[in-house]
Image (cartoon, rainbow, N blue to C red):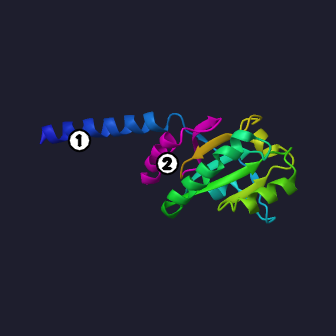
Amino acid sequence: MKKYIAAASVVLALAVGAGVYFNSGATAAPASTFVLLDGTQKSTADLKGKVTLVNFWATSCVTCVGEMPKVIATYDKYKAQGYDTLAVAMSYDPPSYVVNFAETRKLPFKVAIDNTGSVAQAWGDVKLTPTTYLVNKRGEIVKRYVGEPDFAELHKLIEKLLAEA
């Protein structure tokens, strides 16, 4: 019996240690209100329960435009499993350009315009595009990418986060 108690204690200690290790880099996503192209609003609290990619981008950003097909493919691949994407256009991006881009490229996910720059400010004073955050189901930022992500690595991380309870 003592062996079982000792083994259970070791397993518990390892599980707690692993939990601390895996969650050590995660920080709560900042409280923000996103104004979507259709005029509705979404808040950071609305991200909870799904793994969400928050992508700060601009129509004038060559890398952003170049990575968008991969962002769409990633969304299409995982959306049925509890994954979402929110594309946040920078404050300097003319709204008409953003609407035109979203319509002509048939972006399948929500697009917000950060008119005042307050969302970019809240998310770490984002100035470079693309800047992308991966948020877990608990609403915590797990990873930040400046520039185009390594999509193979991103997919592995998404799969790991989707598997979490």
> Looking at the picture, does residue 7 appear above or below residue 34?
above
In the image, which residues are magenta? Answer: 138-165
Where disc 1 sits, the SS reads: helix
Instruction: Point out the image quarter for the C terminus.
Output: bottom left
Give the x, y percent position of residue 51.
54, 53
Residue that numbered label 1 is attached to: 8
Answer whether residue 34 is magenta in the image.
Answer: no
> Can the viewer see residue 135 in this picture?
yes
Give the x, y percent position of residue 48.
59, 55
Residue that numbered label 2 is attached to: 158
Mark 1 residue crowding within 10 angstroms, few (<14) / some (14–19) / many (20+): few
Which residue is at the front of the view, 73 or 127? 73
Which residue is at the front of the view, 16 or 137? 137
> Can the viewer see residue 34 in this picture?
no
Which residue is at the front of the view, 15 or 145? 145
Give the x, y percent position of residue 26.
55, 38
> Total of numbered circles in the picture?
2
Q: Earlier in the sequence, mark 2 or mark 1?
A: 1
Mark 2 residue crowding within 10 angstroms, few (<14) / some (14–19) / many (20+): many
Real-space Cα distance between discs 2 and 1?
31 Å
- Name the kind of residue labelled 1 in the image: Ala
